[in-house]
Amino acid sequence: MEFDTIAAISTPMGEGAIAIVRLSGDEAIQIADKLFRGVGGKKLLGAASHTIHYGHLLDPKSGEVIEEVMVSVMKGPKTFTKEDVVEINCHGGIVSVNRVLQHVLKYGARLAEPGEFTKRAFLNGRIDLSQAEAVMDLIRAKTDRAMNVALGQMEGRLSKLIRKLRQEILEVLAHVEVNIDYPEYDDVEEMTHRMLLEKAHLVREEIQKLLQTSQQGKILREGLSTVIVGRPNVGKSSLLNSLVHENKAIVTDIPGTTRDVIEEYVNVRGVPLRLLDTAGIRETEDIVERIGVERSRQVLKEADLILLVLNYSDQLTPEDENLFEVVKGMDVIVIVNKTDLPPKINMERVHELSKDHKLVTTSLLEDRGVDALEEAISSLFFAGSIEAGDMTYVSNTRHIAILNQSLQTIEDAIQGVETGVPIDIVQIDMTRTWELLGEIIGDSVHESLIDQLFSQFCLGK
């Protein structure tokens, strides 16, 4: 498959020691060679693959020095895209790296679309679709655990399992074809039914195992949407600051200080939290605060985890009791804060209200109870789980949806065999399962979906 030559900046924009402009395509080396002048007039065209060369980029027309550079030459197919790849290492800085890119584009390259380098790696057969998606998961990983899951997928752990399942289905489909072509052999029909049922149960079991990891995998990939709620001045912003280990939220004794939803990512024992500190939920005449309260109620509905904060030195109020009603049926950790102050809260009533939830006591002022809270968060979602490096996790929403569809079609096939449905009808469900699993690795997927997936990548990747 032949493509034109693309180029993009592959490092984050801004000041830094080094920035990289990457080219990929049949003319990548030629285009870079037009601009490059090495020590002693050295050129890139005759350079060995996977070597790096010091020199300058010059404008071919004016002879003006563009940048001092180190240029890496990598010849296909032993590259990420399986094409010729050149990486121009220049000084980090918006002006310098843009200057290099503009000259590369001027002399024959095209600006790459988002994710086009990885897309070419997929289209050229170097990686499958699930591995390509893992590239972006690796870039976006916020914890070591999430990174390990992405690395496992990039190395093809999920791909190998999916290919194995598809091969199992193909084998049984071949036997079904024999049964259809030679119906006079009764023993073949009986054997085919038995084999079909056995393979279908095996495939269903493996799909179910993958789906069992999906909740944890999705959490590792996307983070837990975690909302801190409570009446004003119970210590919500202090809790945010304690978990983030920075003073991100304003902390005062004045009720209603937080007027909007404050968002922050935090790593709690390998669990990524998208932490939202909300305005205290209460009735108020302040128009700005009331808008914040309404936003707080909205994010509550979309949360994966609720941290409900109470004040140890205050009596329980109807507003507190109402919060327990609001979060009923959700994953909730109840935090009784300010235990350094004289007790006024009715702890017996708190235990009664928290009977379905974990309960932690803290003094955020004295930094007490935060470890217990972190342990409660971790154990709530990863209790007794195997470490990410020891198993295949499914974390991608697209993969989870396809696996659920595959589970349904394989169950339809099992039910068909058990109820005596004609074998050619059962074959349709088995074939559909095979096709669905192929969508995960990109063996049977529409071009429009491929374009949509890679458009979510950053430029230069």
Image: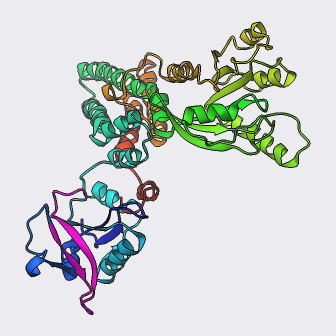
Is residue 280 found left or right of 177 in the rendered image?
right
- Tell me the quadrant of the picture where the C terminus can be found: bottom left
Residue 85 in the magenta stretch? The answer is: no
**Looking at the image, which residue sits at the far right?**
285
Q: How is the image coloured?
A: rainbow
Nearer to us in this view, 404 or 326: 326
Residue 309, by quadrant, is top right
Q: Is residue 389 left or right of residue 417?
A: left
Looking at the figure, which quarter contains the N terminus? Answer: bottom left
Vertical arrangement, residue 52 with respect to residue 422, above or below: below
Question: In this picture, which residue range is highlighted in magenta?
Answer: 53-80
| Front-lying residue, 138 or 77 | 138
Counting from the top left corner in percent of width and height, residue 363 is at 65, 21
Q: Residue furthest bottom?
A: 62
Looking at the image, can residue 180 be seen? no
Q: Position of residue 19 (x, y in %)?
A: 33, 64
